[in-house]
Image: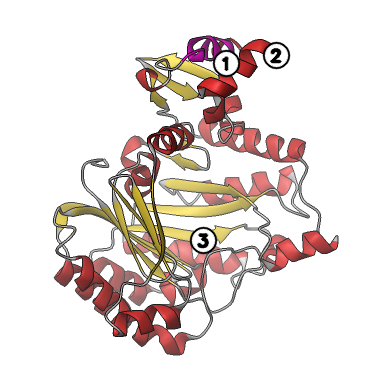
Amino acid sequence: MNNKDLPGLYVHVPFCKTKCPYCDFYSITDPSLIQSWLDGIEKEALIYNREWLPAFDTLYIGGGTPSILDEYGLGRLMDILRNSFSFAPDTEVTIEVNPDDITASRLACYEALGINRLSIGVQSLQEAELRFLQRRHTAIAAERAIGLVQSSGFRNFGVDLMYGFHGQTRKSWTDTLERVLSWGPAHLSCYQLTLSDGTPFGRMVSEGTLKRATEEQERQFFIHTSHFLQDHGFIHYEVSNFAKGEEYFSCHNLKYWQRAPYLGLGPGAHSFRDNARWWNCRSVRDYCRLLLEGKRPVAGQERLSPEQVRLEMLLLGFRTARGVDMDDIVDQPFNGEVLARLTSSGIVRVEENRVSPTLNGYLIADRLPLMFFSLISFFIKVFY
């Protein structure tokens, strides 16, 4: 399980073969820059290797599409990281992979490099939905890829899925869930499609050529997903994440939600430690240029005030089944009354001195923290 006292390491691989129209993560489709990016990662790692002396116990290689890296590129990346940092013996090492990139030799490479967890971006098993999402794999290709994963001996693999978009029905979504569960994944991430302004899908919404799901449709999909997966033995441990058991929780992502320290390397990567957060520039070329000049590729930073720390603690805590400590809530005026109202309304539950969201609480997880700030609580008390 995750050790909150140890930091996590994230590496952003900002390369994709094609760009999905809904994706708001930074990536480019020019593979000619991969070697320059690796040079940059090596330089950035050297900047931080003495500043982050405790051993990392999670490593997450995300993107972009990390599986775009060939065996040489990934091998060099792992050598850079292991030569620069210390890792705990039982480190969780995750890589995000696209089904089209999975081969028997690639899986053998992952195992040889010490990668012990796969996050496979399937999104859907309906051909029409995959075309709408402009994924480069088919449902048949995804099934074939999972077969290779199973035969390779990987047991700790998760599948990323997407719901709540144009053309999807509850029946098609349930069919995807049933077929995915037949593969025996240890973990599922089920994300509602987000239509960000800067993406092609976001622009289509602005132009009126693509409709968002209604709030009621989103609610129904969310509740159905949770009930369905819990009925099949999964723990709904975070708003969008489900695991077959606590041992399969994403230890790296738990660090984000528990406000543990983490270091991010690569263009657009974020880092956090001691209530300070900083993030890198979102450009491979600028990232490499700054490091060649001996500069840190940091685009911005902030130090959180006590009030921001409190809000963030509640915001992240209420996204998880573990919730937040009771003592972090009742120390403010009116919060006891707010808690009583939310408990009686079935929004949160109180167990063992912790306040955690119910399924209905998950639906308003982003709004829950604001209800526990004294000024807002006052207005709730007066007008609710």
| Residue under pointer 3 | 121
**Where is residue 354 drawn, in percent x and y?**
38, 19
- Dot 1: within a 10 Å radius of its alpha carbon, few (fewer than 14), some, or many (20 or more) residues? some
Examine the rendered structure and indicate whether residue 17 appears above or below residue 214.
below
- Dot 3: within a 10 Å radius of its alpha carbon, few (fewer than 14), some, or many (20 or more) residues? many
Left or right for 206, reference 61: right
Three-letter amino acid code of the residue under disc 1: Leu
Examine the rendered structure and indicate whether residue 43 appears above or below residue 242.
below
Earlier sequence position, callout 1 versus callout 2: 1
For the point 68% across and 39% down, the residue is 221
Of labels 3 and 2, the one closer to you: 2
Rendering quarter of residue 24: bottom right
Q: Secondary structure at mark 3?
A: strand
* Quarter of the image where the C terminus is located: top right
| Residue under pointer 1 | 342
| Residue under pointer 2 | 383
| Inter-mark Cα distance, 3 to 2 | 45 Å
Of labels 1 and 3, the one closer to you: 1
Residue stretch rendered in magenta on the structure: 333-341
For the point 22% across and 65% down, the residue is 48
Q: Are marks 1 and 3 in contact (CB under 8 Å)?
A: no
Three-letter amino acid code of the residue under disc 2: Phe
Q: Are marks 3 and 2 in contact (CB under 8 Å)?
A: no
**Where is residue 188 drawn, in percent x and y?**
48, 47
